[in-house]
Structure formats: structure tokens, C-alpha cells
Image (cartoon, rainbow, N blue to C red):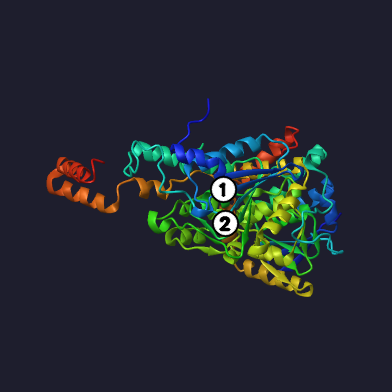
Amino acid sequence: MSRPKWGNEASIAAAPAQVLLDLDVDAGLAWITLNRPEKRNALSVPMRDRIADIFDELALDDRIKVIVLRGNGPSFCSGNEINEDWGQREAGYKRFTVSHAYRYSSELTWGRTSFSQVIARSPKVVVSSVQGFCAAAAYFLLAAKSDLVIVADDAKIGALEARFLGPASSVASLNLNRTIGAKAARFSGYTGSVMNARQAFDCGFACHVSPLADLAADTGRIVREVAARPAGDLARLKARIKRGESEMDNNVPVISGLLASHFFRSHSDEKSFWAAVREGGVGNALKQDKEQAAERGGRP
Amino acid sequence: MTVTAEPLAEQAVLLRVPDPAALDRRDVAAGEELRDALLRAADDDEIKVIVLAGLASTGSSPATASTASTVAGPTPPEQADPAARLFYTGVRGLHQVTAYCKKVVIAEADGACGPTASALCLAADFVLASTRTTFASPFEVAEANYPLAVLTMRANRAKAWMLRGGAIDAAAAFEADFVNQVLAAPDLRGAVTDLARQVALMPLDGVTISKMNVGAAFDVVGVGREFDAVEAALAAGGARW
């Protein structure tokens, strides 16, 4: 029995072509290519599921030492697809229950078994090769969870989702605080600003900056160097990183800003709700809530 | 090996390691001598600052930066003599005594630091290096503490150094926050002395309490747990330290 999958028929069917896997067994390399350039490689839930499944498979493949994440097109990845249906009860349903929000966010970032842990806890060395945008989830779920980040000189990296979803989880992520520094993590999360390639290198996020035209070649060179190390040494070093991060509670999942801002009621709704409470009590507020929902087509 | 203790400035002592290669050979007597000298200085109420000098070989630099090549390293910890292993990685060993030292420790690096010397630099409060200095990856030895490396140089830099291996030069070490200052070799001792004097101006109780706090903070963020985990893995006879 397989793990339950979320998404609609079309998004599930599309995922295998949107996340490509190429193995270079002789070199000990696995290349995972995000292939949805028309959406700047935005990650649907089925795409994330496929990445997680690939990581599970590769974890058991002794021939593979290094997993490389890269993106087709002008950008590495723009983050999560936020306009998708995700097992909602009806298409376009945007107001979720708390349990729905918890289910979604615990699959994404907030659970011990979530997508965010798949990369962070991989027994293989994970490398992100980044050009163009590396935004939102691509920043804190893919690149920031990788062991090495190689960036092109056109890279734009950051918690851009903060601009419309509110302060991002990256503010509180211990991993990001320890990777780019506490002040930089706060600046990134509270402003939604982007880091350019030089800034990413200077703050320790990236280990190498390449001209865009050289990114593929430089990534290939670096990952081959790493993969050339004896398998036992790499496995030991990676285990050491994982153990150290565990001791530091580095990958303790944080509540996503997406959970709070995208799924729960908006600020204006909340103000309206509490104003109605003050005017006529909770019963009045709930009645108003139902009336407003009816105006929106019956959705709560 | 005879570690010498020389007064450097008021309330600062310089411990000179005559044979840094002995540390990479996991020579118990050599490590013990340095550890004991460190403990004696740390327990001396007249001392606030301890300088570790002579950590580097002043011969030619052994490796270049950003390559996956590794310096000829020490005996792999899992193959080391149990006494040597315990001495270098154990709770009363050289490295933990340095990391949790009661006094401020300055590492002076001038030349090619082997893995053990790099690990000691990681454990020290300050590192000052000459321009000709190179640091072998400390992660070739078991006592190099990953959480401490993350605190010192941030997570991805530590991971990159660990996974890519090789030595980095003083300039790269400075950029990565592994080193506080890089100076021309003739100016190194003067800068170390100035820093020691500056720290020694602090009241002894303040220095002591701050070091107590540093130790407690290390324990909170996992430094102590990592030391224990490495020792436990090695004691169990595993190669996965």
C-alpha cells in the first residue's frame, strides 16, 4: 500500500514529466531536474511527492553518493504552487478547516515526516544548483536544506512569499538562522527581500558563485569532486552532519507562515468577526459569518 | 615533546607546541603534555589568557584551497589505539579541555595546520593566522565538533568544508569566519600579544563567568552532546564516528 497522494488527476499525472531523474552511476551522481519552466518550476504537491519518492529510492541505492537538484529554464524554482487544488472538497475552495490546514502544512513543513525533512535528513550529499529565482519554498525547503549550494551570478534568493503571505517561516527556522545568520534570516523573512549571488556567498549560504553560462559545468565539476571521495568517507561525514544537526535541533520543523496566512481567516475577516462579537456577542458574530459565507457562495 | 610556557604579557601565557605533527600522530604523551599545560594555566588565578603557539608546521603549505584532496592525515580514529582515541576525543581529552577551557584561549597559526591543529583552532576562542597559513580540514579527526563549526562559520560553510575536504588558506578561513585576523608573519606575534593584553584588561571574575556561560551555551546547542556521541560511536567500535 503506498502513501496517500494529494492533488488532482491532472497534477498527479503531470508530475513525472515535471520532476526528471537522471542517474550517472559511474560518477555516483543523481540529477533531479525540475522541469516546469513555464511556471518557473513552481512545485505542485505531486511534484513534491515525486521528489520525496525519488529521495527514498536513492537513499537505498549504494551506487549514488550525491544528489543534485537543478531547474530547467531561467529559474531554479519559484517555490510552491499556490493555485493548485490539493484534495479540496470542491474546485477553487479557498477557505479551509483547521484540520485541512494542519494536514497540508504538516505534509509541507510542519511535520516530522514532512517534505521539509526529506532533503534535510537524506543520507546522501545533496547539492542545489541555482539560477534565477530561488524563492519561498525553493529557498527554505530545497536550497537551504541542501549540503552545498552553487549559485549563478543571476540568482535571486529569498522568502518572497513573505510579501503576500506574511512573515515567513524562515524567520524562525533554526537551520536558516545558522546558515545565513540570525539578522539576515530576520531581514529575509520580515521584508521578503532577495539575496543576490554575491550576498548569498558572503553570508555563507552558497559555497560557490558561477557566471550563469558556467553554472552547469561548475556544478558538474564540484559534484564530481565530492563524489570521487570514498563512499565510506562520504557516508560517515554525512552521518556526522545529520547527527550534529540532530543534536542542535537544526531541523525542528517550524510553523509555516503559509499555514497562518494562506489558510486561516484573513485579518480583515478577523476584525469583522470580533467587531460583531463586541456588538452582539459570539452568536451574532457566527450569524454574520454564515451570512458572509452565503454571499461568497456558501463557503464558510 | 616539551611544551614550554612563557609569559607573553601581564596575565597572559604562551604555550608553545614544539612538534605539532605529534598531535596528528595521536601521540598520547604529546597531547597529554599540552592538555596538562593548558589545565595548569587555566587554574592559575594570575592567568586570564592562554595562547597556543606552534600549532602549525612552518614548512611548505601542503594543499590548495577548494580541492577535494586531503592532507596526509592522522590515523583514522577508529583504528587508533584506544588510549589515544580516548585522550583526543574523550571528555578529559585535549580537545574538550580546550573548548571548555576556564580561560580565554587564543590560537596562533603560522604555517600548515594539520587536522588536529585545525580542530584545536576551532575549539579556541580566537584564531590569529599569518598570511602563509593553511588549515587542513579539522573533520579528518573525530574531535572536530560539528555544532561548534556551525556556530563558528555557519552551517553551509562547515558542511562544504567537511564534504569537499582539503585545506583552506588563511584568507579563505578569514572570509569563512574561522579566523579572526590574518597578518603578515612578522606581525603575528605582536597582534596576538595586543589581543591578549586587551582581553587581560577584563576583570578575572568577568572572564571566568563568561567562560562558564560559554560552556553552558555550548551544551544547550549540542556541542557537548556531539562530543559524547562521537566518543560513544568510537567506543562501540564503529567506523561511523
- Which residue is nearer to you in this view: A21 or B142? A21
Decide: few, some or many residues near mark 1? Use Cα within 10 Å; few <14, some 14-19, many ≥20: some
Q: Residue at x 21, y 49 (%)?
A: A274
Mark whose residue sits in front, 1 or 2: 2
User: Disc 1, disc 2: CB below 8 Å?
Assistant: no
- Which residue is nearer to you in this view: A252 or A212? A212
Q: Residue at x 52, y 39 (%)?
A: A49
Q: Position of residue A10 (x, y in %)?
A: 46, 40
Decide: few, some or many residues near mark 2? Use Cα within 10 Å; few <14, some 14-19, many ≥20: some
Where B88 falls versus B53 (above or below)? above
Q: Position of residue B140 (x, y in %)?
A: 76, 48
Which residue type carries mark 2?
A: Gly
Subunit of label 2: A
Q: Residue at x 73, y 73 (%)?
A: B190
Where A262 falls versus B10 (above or below)? above
Q: Secondary structure at mark 1?
A: helix
User: Which residue bears the numbered disc 1?
Assistant: B221
Name the quadrant containing residue A247.
Answer: top right
User: Which residue bears the numbered disc 2?
Assistant: A73
Looking at the rendered structure, the number of numbered marks drawn on it comes to 2
Residue at the extreme left of the image, as rendered: A280
Where A92 falls versus B184 (above or below)? above
Q: Secondary structure at mark 2?
A: loop
The C terminus of chain A sits in image quarter: top left
Where B241 falls versus A271 (above or below)? above
Drawn side of residue A121 relative to residue A280, left or right? right
Q: CA distance from mark 1 to mark 2?
A: 40 Å
Which residue type carries mark 1?
A: Val
Q: Is residue A78 visible?
A: no
Q: Residue at x 48, y 45 (%)?
A: A44
Q: Position of residue B146 (x, y in %)?
A: 65, 49
Discs 1, 2: same chain? no
